[in-house]
Image (cartoon, helix red, strand yellow):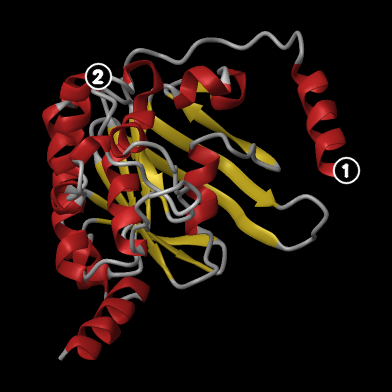
């Protein structure tokens, strides 16, 4: 009941707020201007005075050890949270002044805490773009992007298979199979301005994750005319080395920013962590 009351108060607080629609393209980039964030009711700073620009048309990887603030940064981009201090600018427009529903309507991608939608297999993927969730050609085109071809092929009725153990004769899936469907949902929108992948492939092997990230990167670079930005979050450094820019978070702060070769040449935090992880695979 307390959660419901909080939600009702929050909705009431947003009533009548004049917010703009999301832009149709990103000309320059998305900028974090002295952004800090603390979760409500805590004093711990999750992100501390972040100053960062994600250039339009780029593929940006975010890396760092657990608890460094990677997921928080992506959720701020999705406007699931607003900064405690500072602001996020989409070109010259404060993200806080853009209608959240409109902004998320221009987003694609997947998060690590994805939901298992117990619908028909086609609908579970199609929900990535709600207005087109029943368009089978769009769903069929999204499935290979998420590497979910094998999941659909193994289902007894393909796209028409009822998913989930809550249903009589509903087909349950492994965690990895649910994860592939979640990533496929991220390919449903044709022209998102922002694609965010926050470790959505943790249950998959490094090679599969790399292939999926490459597909998102290729789609982003093919749509450079609208300034699409793709943000990849991973704990596997080898899978994100192809990014145009790499953001290194450490202790809630951005400590390095650059491409793979530049950061390796600096012999700083990124090079140290990359080397440690590479040694673990030998």
Residue 86 pos. (x, y %)? 64, 38
Foreground residue among 130 and 244: 130
Give the CA separation, mark 2 to mark 1.
39 Å
Foreground residue among 216 and 205: 205
Foreground residue among 110 and 56: 110
Asked if the residue under mark 1 is in contact with the one under mark 2, i.e. CB atoms within 8 Å, the reply is no
Whether residue 38 sits left or right of residue 109 in the image: it is right
Q: Quadrant of the image for the C terminus? A: bottom left
SS under mark 2: loop
* Quarter occupied by residue 256: bottom left
Residue 269 pos. (x, y %)? 37, 75
Q: Is residue 241 visible?
A: no
Q: Residue at x 63, y 59 (%)?
A: 46
Q: Which mark is residue 11?
A: none
Question: Mark 2 vs mark 1: which is more N-terminal?
Answer: 1
Whether residue 121 sits left or right of residue 14 in the image: it is left
- In the image, which is nearer the foreground, mark 2 or mark 1? 2
Q: Quadrant of the image for the N terminus? A: top right
The number of callouts visible is 2
Residue 11 pos. (x, y %)? 76, 23
Within 10 Å of disc 2 (Cα), the crowding (few <14, some 14-19, many 20+) is some
Residue 245 pos. (x, y %)? 26, 50
Q: Among all residues in the image, which is located at the extreme front?
A: 168
Label 2, on which residue? 135
Q: Which mark is residue 2?
A: 1
Whether residue 199 sits left or right of residue 274 in the image: it is right
| Whether residue 5 is situated above or below residue 105 in the rendered picture | below
Q: Is residue 88 visible?
A: yes
């Amino acid at each position: 009941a307390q959660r419901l009351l909080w939600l009702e108060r929050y909705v009431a607080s947003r009533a009548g707020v004049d917010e703009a629609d999301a832009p149709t393209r990103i000309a320059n980039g998305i900028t974090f201007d002295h952004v800090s964030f603390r979760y409500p009711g805590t004093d711990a700073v999750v992100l501390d005075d972040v100053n960062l620009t994600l250039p339009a048309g780029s593929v940006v990887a975010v890396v760092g050890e657990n608890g460094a603030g990677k997921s928080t940064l992506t959720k701020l981009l999705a406007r699931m949270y607003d900064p405690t201090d500072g602001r996020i600018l989409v070109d010259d427009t404060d993200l806080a002044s853009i209608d959240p529903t409109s902004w998320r309507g221009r987003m694609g991608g997947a998060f690590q805490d994805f939901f298992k939608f117990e619908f028909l297999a086609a609908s579970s993927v199609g929900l990535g773009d709600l207005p087109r969730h029943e368009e089978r050609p769009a769903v069929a085109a999204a499935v290979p992007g998420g590497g979910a071809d094998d999941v659909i092929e193994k289902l007894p009725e393909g796209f028409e298979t009822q998913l989930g153990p809550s249903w009589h004769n509903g087909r349950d899936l492994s965690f990895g199979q649910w994860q592939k469907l979640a990533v496929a949902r991220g390919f449903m929108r044709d022209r998102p301005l922002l694609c965010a992948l926050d470790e959505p492939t943790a249950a998959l092997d490094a090679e599969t994750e790399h292939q999926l990230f490459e597909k998102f990167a290729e789609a982003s670079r093919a749509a450079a005319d609208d300034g699409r930005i793709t943000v990849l979050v991973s704990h596997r450094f080898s899978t994100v080395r192809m990014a145009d820019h790499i953001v290194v978070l450490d202790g809630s702060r951005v400590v390095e920013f650059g491409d793979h070769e530049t950061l390796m040449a600096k012999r700083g935090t990124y090079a140290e962590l990359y080397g440690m992880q590479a040694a673990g695979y030998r």
